[in-house]
Amino acid sequence: MAANLNSNVLIIGGGQAGFQTAHTLRAKGHVGPIQIIGDEPHLPYQRPPLSKAFLAGELNVERLFFRPATYYEQQNIDIKLGVSVESLCRTSKTVRTTDGTTLAYDVLVLATGARVRPLPDGICTKPEQLLYLRGIDDVQRLLAASTTKNSFLIIGGGFIGLEAAATLKKLGKTVVVAEFQPMVIPGLVAPELSQYLENLHRNMGVDVRTNTNATHVRSQADNGFDIGFGFDIGFADGIRLNVDAVLVGIGVLPNVEFGQAAGLKTDRGFCVDAQARTNDPNIFAVGDCAHGQNTWVSTPIHLESVQNAIDQASIAAQAILGSDKEYAAVPWFWSDQYHVKIQMAGLITDYDQTVVTGEPDDDKFSIFYFQNDQLIAVHTANHPVNHMAARRILAQAEPVTFADCTKHGFDGKALMNITK
Ligand SMILES: Cc1cc2nc3c(=O)[nH]c(=O)nc-3n(C[C@H](O)[C@H](O)[C@H](O)COP(=O)(O)OP(=O)(O)OC[C@H]3O[C@@H](n4cnc5c(N)ncnc54)[C@H](O)[C@@H]3O)c2cc1C
């Protein structure tokens, strides 16, 4: 696409990636109109604190916003909130919103993120009473519940479920985590890290149950959430449990439907190239709603992280401005649970060897992952030095090998100084 600083850019979704696209466009000199359409009633905000400090009541809502309302006025970014886009016409280059407006674009950026995956139909007798954790409104509902309810079942032992468990525990609640797979954070970390997290939560008083599947979640309420009396839970192995509230954290579904209906290709999100462009050259997709090329890996990937939302959106904005820069960032992610910061750099798909350094018992250790003798990822607990080093090492063109790591004692700082 030829550079056009005057093009009319329409961004759908006012989350991390939508905000970053608009911000980068203006910062890099785009002078044409920029409009953000977001279906939430809030200014663009960061989600990570939702399961951490914000849920703990340690952060007020203003601190979540990337920028105050004045920023959008000053930057001449038109932001329309509480409005959803329901259809796209690629021929006329327009979208239609739920308030009946038709909006035209030269360049469209889809930054629609993802929504929570609901508990499958038929399991819960009153699905409207279930709690989820994706947006500010969900947390406010959860906080309201936490003022009157004392025991929580969290269905799903992924990052969101475990972070919520840690925070609810901090609030003095009784917490049970039920994970369907044999270990928590299934598939995303080595068994050593899963086991460590399971032990950590158990030591903090959370009842972590793996290999367990809730088959029914019966509401004991006779009327509505506010006067609910809790739930009777049945598991596949016959075990029963009574809790006051149920939080479901079983993953997310990318918001792709209106784009898909308009003929955009999808996989685990809109299929995009290394500049975040979809199969329509005038339409980009960024963040949690995208699935695509990151030249750091050989196959298209889908990532759900702040790093991905920021880096991919920045690349898309630069492509709109005529740059040929490609998305090539080392993926990284973090999670805070109690006093432990887990940080992950790289991807662990198809690893065949791991080395653990440090002491899980001291809550400070690192896991180095290898594939065919090459370092592909490093996960750390309370070891920011190794994490930062890993991000630098993994970004190098020449791979660091198992032999390099052995020679340098699996020490991040030493490995960073290898010159090849
Ligand atoms: C509780 C929680 C904790 C997290 N913690 C971490 C963490 O510690 N570290 C980390 O790296 N990542 C974390 N993440 C993930 C990270 O926040 C996401 O990957 C990131 O927010 C993705 O940004 P996004 O802009 O792609 O999507 P979103 O932030 O989901 O934004 C998309 C926006 O588009 C809106 N939208 C959707 N469809 C439409 C439509 N048709 N019309 C208008 N608007 C629409 C959505 O409502 C939403 O507001 C966390 C996520 C959650 C929910």
Image (tube, rainbow, N blue to C red):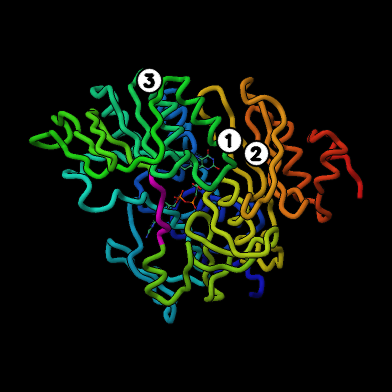
Between residues 2 and 188, which one lies in front from this camera angle?
A: 188
Mark 2 closeness class: few <14, some 14–19, many ≥20 residues within 10 Å: many
Q: Give the mark nearer the N terminus: 1 vs 2.
A: 1
What residue is shown with label 1? 193
Between residues 265 and 186, which one lies in front from this camera angle?
A: 186
What is the spatial separation of the Cα atoms under label 1 and label 2, in whole angstroms? 8 Å
What residue is shown at x 40% (from left), y 24% (from top)?
206
What residue is shown at x 38% (from left), y 46% (from top)?
250
Q: Is residue 105 magenta?
A: no
- Judged left or right of residue 403, residue 365 is left
Residue 68, compared with residue 363, is above or below; it is: below
What is the spatial separation of the Cα atoms under label 3 and label 2, in whole angstroms? 28 Å
Q: Quadrant of the N terminus?
A: bottom right
Residue found farthest to the left: 222
Q: Are marks 1 and 2 in contact (CB under 8 Å)?
A: yes
Q: Are marks 3 and 2 in contact (CB under 8 Å)?
A: no
Q: Is residue 62 visible?
A: no
Measured from the top left, where is residue 2 in percent x and y? 66, 75
What residue is shown at x 71% (from left), y 67% (from top)?
324
- Say if disc 1 is inside 8 Å of ligand 1: no
Residue 24, compared with residue 415, is above or below; it is: below
Quarter of the rendering containing residue 58 = top left
Q: Element under label 2?
A: strand
Q: Is residue 253 magenta?
A: yes
Mark 3 closeness class: few <14, some 14–19, many ≥20 residues within 10 Å: some
Residues shaded magenta = 250-255
**Three-letter amino acid code of the residue under disc 3:** Leu
What residue is shown with label 3? 171
- Judged left or right of residue 215, residue 179 is right
Q: Give the mark nearer the N terminus: 3 vs 2.
A: 3
